[in-house]
Amino acid sequence: MTKTAIAKKVGIFVAMLSQYTTTKKFPSIETFALLCEVLEASADEILGIHLK
């Protein structure tokens, strides 16, 4: 999925999504939850948390 498609589904600008991916900005908890839903990924996966 492209950044444009992800941004559109979440309701944010592509520039903001780019800032999230470079860690210049962090999304609100609501936006983060939407990103998880759109990407069909858990918060742990996105944050790189590996539970044993």
Image: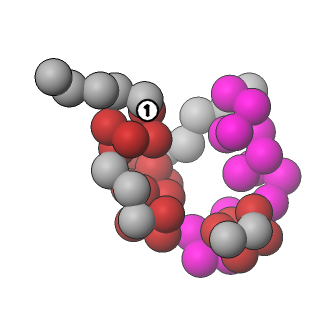
- In the rendered image, residue 39, in percent from the top left (x then y), is placed at 49, 63
Q: Residue furthest front?
A: 52
Q: Where residue 8 sits in the image (x, y, percent)?
A: 68, 76
Which residue is more in the foreground, 7 or 48? 48
Q: Could you say where residue 2 lies in the image, as x and y percent from the top left?
A: 75, 68
Tag 1: residue type?
A: Leu
Q: Is residue 36 above or below residue 20?
A: below
Give, as a single range, the part of the protein colored magenta: 8-23
Does residue 1 show up magenta in the picture? Answer: no
Indicate whether 9 appears above or below 15: below
Snapshot colouring? secondary structure
Q: Say which residue appears at 55% left-offset and 42% top-offset.
A: 27
Q: Is residue 23 visible?
A: yes
Residue at 84% x, 52% y is 15
- Residue wearing tag 1: 47
Most common secondary structure along the magenta stretch: helix
Where the N terminus falls, by quadrant?
Answer: bottom right
* Residue depicted at x 40% and y 65%: 40
